[in-house]
Image (tube, rainbow, N blue to C red):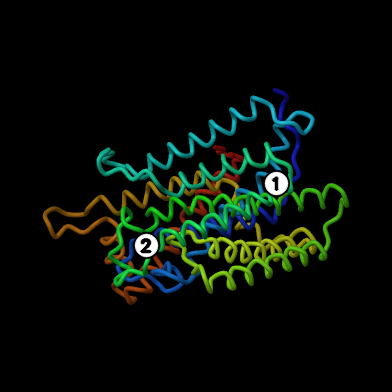
């Protein structure tokens, strides 16, 4: 296999990824708090909060980055057998890492949840890569549309009534990993595909025109607004629901992602205003490593205890009580704990950045 080709790098995409990882870190650590700050709380059922944007944003970024990375490992723009093996190995490795996080640290197979964040990323990444390598562009658009409409048809056949008490939903019932969420892999793949279409367009624009203009940013804005409007209109029949990964949710969040990418592109690539973005770029360079490490630490905070007996507090609750709750209310305490955690992981990312270490998966 020939060595990887030099790829175009969009610092705006690194910034977008860093902002998304920052949001993911805040939301995940805040989920441990007894009282979650409204900005960091997922919607209980229908609707879309700031916290609900984070995961689809990352999936969208996976698709955008794929448009730049796949061409590096192809020969004369044609996929090789080595490329397919590379895609499969990466997908299997990500899935295995997801299982490792889910089982940490007891690893009781009877209690192990198969689904998870990395598992969803790995499957949608592999499926999208195979689609874009095997089908022409018009067929790819058709597949994306069929996936979204196919989910709608499935939801119509197996409607899910709103639970009376959303907080008591378990993963095995209908929550994040329920039946319709598995069918939601269709809309998940569609999100990654739409990210790929965006990345392929940007790549063609940058290479062909060799300039970066505000008209390109405005094109992203127009497509973003169109996607938001379509998602909102679709929600009249198919509600925007993160727990079920509905098609309207996919379109709505892709639209928001396009708007944020457009803002980053305009400021960084077009206007060359880079100073503000450096902190986010640092966090985005080792995003998967930071995410995995933070999830393992969250498991430690949740499963370990300070003290003995039935009254022993989890490490998280002990730290929250002794550092934050003595001077702020519970909701603010959870937010500050998440903010301090984000700062810690940024320092870890900065340490890696200063040493030019890139932990690729």
10 Å neighbourhood of mark 2: few (<14), some, or many (≥20)?
some
Q: Which of 352 and 106 is in front in this view?
A: 106
Up/down of 196 relative to 155, above or below = above
Q: Position of residue 94 (x, y in %)?
A: 48, 39
Circle on res. 186: none
Q: Are marks 2 and 1 in contact (CB under 8 Å)?
A: no
Q: Which residue is rendered at x = 57% and y = 57% of the image?
A: 148
| Quarter assignment of residue 320 | bottom left
Q: In the picture, which quadrant includes the C terminus?
A: top right
Q: In the picture, which quadrant includes the N terminus?
A: top right
Circle on res. 139: 1
The local secondary structure at tag 1 comes to helix
Q: Which residue is rendered at x = 79% and y = 30% of the image?
A: 76
Residue that badge 2 annotates: 31
Q: Which of 216 and 129 is in front in this view?
A: 129
Up/down of 237 relative to 310, above or below = below
Q: Earlier in the sequence, mark 2 or mark 1?
A: 2
| Quarter assignment of residue 261 | bottom right
Q: Which residue is rendered at x = 51% and y = 52% of the image?
A: 347
Mark 2 or mark 1: which is in front?
Answer: 1
């Amino acid at each position: 296999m020939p060595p990887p080709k030099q790829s175009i790098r969009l610092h705006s995409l690194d910034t977008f990824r860093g902002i998304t990882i920052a949001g993911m870190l805040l939301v995940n650590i805040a989920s441990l708090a007894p009282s979650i700050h409204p900005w960091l709380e997922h919607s209980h059922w229908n609707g879309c909060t700031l916290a609900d944007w984070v995961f689809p944003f990352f999936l969208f970024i996976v698709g955008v980055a794929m448009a730049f990375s796949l061409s590096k490992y192809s020969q004369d723009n044609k996929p090789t057998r080595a490329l397919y093996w590379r895609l499969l190995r990466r997908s299997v490795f990500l899935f295995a890492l997801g299982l490792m996080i889910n089982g940490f640290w007891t690893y009781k197979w009877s209690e192990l949840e198969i689904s998870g964040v990395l598992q969803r990323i790995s499957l949608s990444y592999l499926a999208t890569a195979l689609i874009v390598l095997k089908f022409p562009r018009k067929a790819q658009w058709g597949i994306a549309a069929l996936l979204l409409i196919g989910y709608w048809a499935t939801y119509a056949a197996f409607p899910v009534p709103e639970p009376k008490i959303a907080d008591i939903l378990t993963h095995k019932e209908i929550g994040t990993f329920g039946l319709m969420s598995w069918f939601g892999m269709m809309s998940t793949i569609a999100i990654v595909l739409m990210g790929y279409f965006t990345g392929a367009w940007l790549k063609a624009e940058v290479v062909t025109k060799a300039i970066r203009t505000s008209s390109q940013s405005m094109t992203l804005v127009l497509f973003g607004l169109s996607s938001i409007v379509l998602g909102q209109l679709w929600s009249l029949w198919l509600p925007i629901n993160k727990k079920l990964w509905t098609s309207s949710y996919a379109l709505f969040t892709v639209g928001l992602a396009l708007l944020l990418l457009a803002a980053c592109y305009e400021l960084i690539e077009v206007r060359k205003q880079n100073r503000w973005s450096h902190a986010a770029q640092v966090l985005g360079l080792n995003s998967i490593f930071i995410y995995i490490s933070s999830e393992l630490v969250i498991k430690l905070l949740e499963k370990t205890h300070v003290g003995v007996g039935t009254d022993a507090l989890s490490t998280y609750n002990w730290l929250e009580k002794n550092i934050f709750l003595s001077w702020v209310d519970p909701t603010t305490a959870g937010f500050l704990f998440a903010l301090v955690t984000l700062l810690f992981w940024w320092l870890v990312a900065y340490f890696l950045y200063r040493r030019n270490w890139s932990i690729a998966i």
